[in-house]
Amino acid sequence: MLTTSLLCALTLSGCSSSTDFNPTDAEIAKLEKRLDRHRCVGKLENWRRTYVRLPIFTQEEVAAAKREKRLERVENFDKRFVEFKLERADGRSIVAGRVKPKSYDDLPAGGCVEPNCLGGGFAIPRDELYLDCEKRAAP
């Protein structure tokens, strides 16, 4: 996810920020329409889906975090970009459906291995989906 975040952040110019890390229902619907047609996703209802806005870090915060040897604190989020994680539902520990996180830190991190987990991003104004996956269709 971090790689996708950095790559996509570099491709977006300017900042349209918000303190709300959750994308709107309309933004998620637009993204899910694209995901549902993607060869690596297959049927969207077979996945647990988590969506958050891309965090914005100021240069001052990055420098302070580096000096203090801590993670950067997120205060604003880019309203033009959504990060996501898809986890294939197994009906036991991973239940299909959309998860609305209570904080940005609730986006599941690490342990994302294809084909049972996919991560990526969505540039809302350009309607562009970023999803790295193998060149095979999802079951």
Image: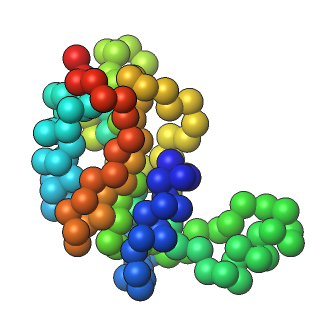
Residue 7 image position (x, y, % from top left): 48, 61
Residue 77 image position (x, y, % from top left): 45, 71
**Residue 83 vertical placement versus 47 (above, below):** below
Which residue occupies 23% across, 72% down? 125
Structure colour scheme? rainbow
Q: Is residue 98 left or right of residue 75?
A: left
Which residue occupies 72% across, 60% down? 71
Which residue occupies 32% across, 22% down? 89
Quarter of the rendering containing residue 37: top left
- Image label count: 0
Instruction: Look at the image and tell me whether residue 96 can be seen.
Output: no
Residue 134 image position (x, y, % from top left): 36, 29
Instruction: Look at the image and tell me whether residue 19 can be seen.
Output: yes
Which residue occupies 30% across, 29% down? 135
Q: Quadrant of the C terminus?
A: top left
- Viewer-side residue, 102 vs 117: 117
Residue 59 image position (x, y, % from top left): 66, 81
**Residue 116 vertical placement versus 9 (above, below):** above
**Residue 125 vertical placement versus 110 (above, below):** below
Q: Is residue 126 left or right of residue 86?
A: left
